[in-house]
Amino acid sequence: MNYYLAPMEGLTTYQFRIAYHHYFGGIDKYFTPFISSKKMNHRERSEILPKHNEGLHVIPQILTNRSDEFLQIADKIKDYGYSTVNLNLGCPSGTVVARKRGAGFLSIPDSLDRFLYELYEKCPLNISIKTRIGIESLDEWKNLLKIYQKYPVEELIIHPRLQKELYHFTPHIEAFQTALHSSTMPLCYNGDLTSVTTFNTLVTKFPQINRVMIGRGIIKNPALIFAMRDLKEKHLYQNFYQKERFRAFHDTLFDSYATTMSGETPTLFKMKDLWTYLSQSFIDSSPYLKKIRKATSFAQYKIAIDTLFRECELMPTP
């Protein structure tokens, strides 16, 4: 099984990837948050700098509906030594969808087809795709899949939800099954893999799956991958699921943000976003999370963190 870290805007930054790889690892591919401008702002450029990704297998992701813009971004990415890029056709955000980008591009399949034709004809890099299965109806998926099958897609990462569903409701596993039965391209499953139970349910139903992408599940519990591995390696999970390791991971990430961000406020916002997920690794963490969110200075934040790690125990094996 190959494990991928999903791109999550504002969360799976290069600082997060570096700290995660050092203390946990086990990820076969890391995908960057999307790049959406051919000019590449400082944040986007920082995500793909080789010095920020040493020892990691990183795939930059592009979000656009213009082939010329995609190709210009891909050329710049190529200059940094990358051989593959990922096209974002999965982002369900309203502002992105309104501009027919991300999952919004799925609403105009003929334009998407022409777009992909130009990309696969001219792009100097391999292209993988991360996609939703439609906008409003499951009936859209078969046509979208036919479009993808026309091209040498290096890898099709499928989040089997419609755009309108955002991250709600149960993924439409039958849509992934359709792709497995009708497609020869490499397929990766993405969506709601947040525990050993959900993972085992998936691989029991589809034993041919050999790659999965996980986002929220890893941020909630950085040691989750080790819990998903074969029972013969269960000791790995026990080795990695420890408060001391969590604390070291947190402190390294905090210090990295504090060093690279301008001031206490943006650093605190970043860490508070992370704790929305990470707090779910701890038993009865709600009152401690409230104190973390109320912190307005590094001093207050560190007191709240010290208290949580001292008084809260980790959840049982997920």
Image (tube, rainbow, N blue to C red):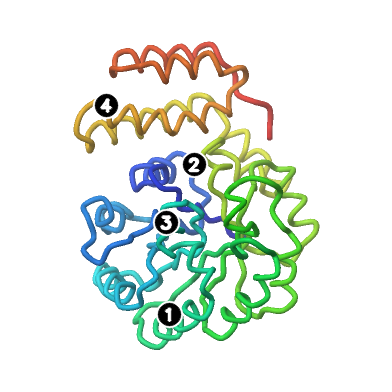
Q: Which residue is mark 1?
A: 115
Which residue reaches farthest right? Answer: 205
Q: Which residue is mark 2?
A: 24
Is residue 146 left or right of 291 when viewed as pictured? right
- Mark 4 in CB contact with mark 3 (< 8 angstroms): no
Q: CA distance from mark 1 to mark 4?
A: 41 Å
Q: Which residue is mark 3?
A: 96
Mark 2: which secondary structure?
loop
| Label 1 or label 4, whichever comes before in sequence order | 1
Packing grade of label 2 (10 A; few <14, some 14-19, many >=20) is: many
Three-letter residue code for mark 1: Phe
Residue at 45%, 48% (x, y): give it: 8
Three-letter residue code for mark 2: Phe
Is residue 140 left or right of 244 when viewed as pictured? right
Frontmost of labels 4 and 3 is 3
Frontmost of labels 3 and 2 is 3
| Image quadrant where residue 240 sits | top right
Is residue 186 left or right of 97 when viewed as pictured? right
Q: How many marks?
A: 4
Q: CA distance from mark 4 to mark 3?
A: 27 Å
| Label 3 or label 2, whichever comes before in sequence order | 2
